[in-house]
Image: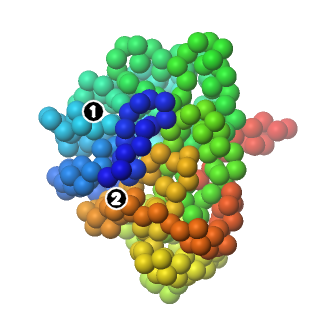
């Protein structure tokens, strides 16, 4: 599998990154099966794994640690994230106020907890899962710099930060003589293209690596969703039924686009998921695409998607279905600033 340098870190990562969000109680609760999927990904040439403390309340990290125990750990670039509360998120319970966010207190505690669950001495890439406008960026960068100096992490980045936050963070790091963010992890797919307007150009300008999440738009581009097909009741569709209900009027836009994309994929001699993933990797600012299988077949149908280079006429045809810089559904998967809330506008 082809490798690409991850931003300014010097680390070489595979163009496909294994995302472990669906391993554990919210996806696949069978630890042994999940470990087999991870091992198959590694055997297929993937050397980049991404998880987060919030995935199944830490269970995904535990599973990942089991899979990487022993000699495999040294050959893997391991990434995880912090920000969200890992208890109370999927229940009615309200989390304690200092158990989430990007405060120094939470970042350091969360990193130590992740190291323990992952059963490792270091994390290759530690990421802030979302922005936290209640904490000064220099405070967040200070905490991450300290973790690097302590040897607990090798590099750090952010996830789903708007372009203005990444640029401000770079300015703060330069002013304070701190290590800046090395990576950004935004959503990107044929259906969600807003990052092409400002975030991807900003990351390229700042020499930040990008590992894009949901290249299949949560499964919409997997080939499983078609007009007239029965409603799916598994995986992400089970967790967020409204987002995947084919009878919901707003989702008709995706179904209409899928019909056109299926034709484009067939004419290019590709499956729809291979077309979708290869398309994300075609952008020069994208380092790696995160694929998030729940079962083995989800992984095996994607392996090899990084080997395709799409011709200009194929890219033009896709642009005609979804305009560059736009989304099929407005602002899908985009972080919304608290400044938009009524109490902050009035």
Occupied quadrant, residue 315: bottom right
The structure residue drawn at horizontal position 20% and vertical position 52%, both measured from the top left corner, is 43
Q: Residue furthest right?
A: 346
Q: Position of residue 132 (x, y in %)?
A: 60, 31
Taking the image as drawn, is residue 325 in sight? yes
Q: Is residue 219 above or below residue 163?
A: below
Q: Position of residue 328 (x, y in %)?
A: 65, 66
Q: Residues within 10 Å of mark 2 (few under 14, many from 20)?
A: many
Q: Position of residue 187 (x, y in %)?
A: 54, 51
Between the C-alphas of marks 1 and 2, the distance is 21 Å
Indicate the secondary structure of the residue bearing disc 2: loop
Q: Is residue 266 left or right of residue 171?
A: left
Q: Is residue 115 left or right of residue 102?
A: left
Quarter of the picture containing the C terminus is top right
Q: Is residue 330 left or right of residue 187?
A: right
The structure residue drawn at horizontal position 37% and vertical position 38%, both measured from the top left corner, is 12
Q: Position of residue 8 (x, y in %)?
A: 49, 30
Q: Is residue 10 above or below residue 25?
A: above
Q: Residue furthest left?
A: 70
The structure residue drawn at horizontal position 34% and vertical position 29%, both measured from the top left corner, is 123
**The label number, if any, that marks residue 340 in the structure image:** none
- In depth, the one of 135 and 122 nearer the eye is 122
Q: Give the label, 1 or 2, closer to the camera.
A: 2
Q: Residues within 10 Å of mark 1 (few under 14, many from 20)?
A: some
Taking the image as drawn, is residue 53 in sight? no
- In depth, the one of 102 and 320 nearer the eye is 320
Decide: marks 1, 2 in contact (CB < 8 A)? no
**The label number, if any, that marks residue 293 in the structure image:** 2
Indicate the secondary structure of the residue bearing disc 1: helix
The structure residue drawn at horizontal position 44% and vertical position 37%, both measured from the top left corner, is 6
Q: Is residue 138 left or right of residue 306?
A: right
Residue beneath disc 1: 117
């Amino acid at each position: 599998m082809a490798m690409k340098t991850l931003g300014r870190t010097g680390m070489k990562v595979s163009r496909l990154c294994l995302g472990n969000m669906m391993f554990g109680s919210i996806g696949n609760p069978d630890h042994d099966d999940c470990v087999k999927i991870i091992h198959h990904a590694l055997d297929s040439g993937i050397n980049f794994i991404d998880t987060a403390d919030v995935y199944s309340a830490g269970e995904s990290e535990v599973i990942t640690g089991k899979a990487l125990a022993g000699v495999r750990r040294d050959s893997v670039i391991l990434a995880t994230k912090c920000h969200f509360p890992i208890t109370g998120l999927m229940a009615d319970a309200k989390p304690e106020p200092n158990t989430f966010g990007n405060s120094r207190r939470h970042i350091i505690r969360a990193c130590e907890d992740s190291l323990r669950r992952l059963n490792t001495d270091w994390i290759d890439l530690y990421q802030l899962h979302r922005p936290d406008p209640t904490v000064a960026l220099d405070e967040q960068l200070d905490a991450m710099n300290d973790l690097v100096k302590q040897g607990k992490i090798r590099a750090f980045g952010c996830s789903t930060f708007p372009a203005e936050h990444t640029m401000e963070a770079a300015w703060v790091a330069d002013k304070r003589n701190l290590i800046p963010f090395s990576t950004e992890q935004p959503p990107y797919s044929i259906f969600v293209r807003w990052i092409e307007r400002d975030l991807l150009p900003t990351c390229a300008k700042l020499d930040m690596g990008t590992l894009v999440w949901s290249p299949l738009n949560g499964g919409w581009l997997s080939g499983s969703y078609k007009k007239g097909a029965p409603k799916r009741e598994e995986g992400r569709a089970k967790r967020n039924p409204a987002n995947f209900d084919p009878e919901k009027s707003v989702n008709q836009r995706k179904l209409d686009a899928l019909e056109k994309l299926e034709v484009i994929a067939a004419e290019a001699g590709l499956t729809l998921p291979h077309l979708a993933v290869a398309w994300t990797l075609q952008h020069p600012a994208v380092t790696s695409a995160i694929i998030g299988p729940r079962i083995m077949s989800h992984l095996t149908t994607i392996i090899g998607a990084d080997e395709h280079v799409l011709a200009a006429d194929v890219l033009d045809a896709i642009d005609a279905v979804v305009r560059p810089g736009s989304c099929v559904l407005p602002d899908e998967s985009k972080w919304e600033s608290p400044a938009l809330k009524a109490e902050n506008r009035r």
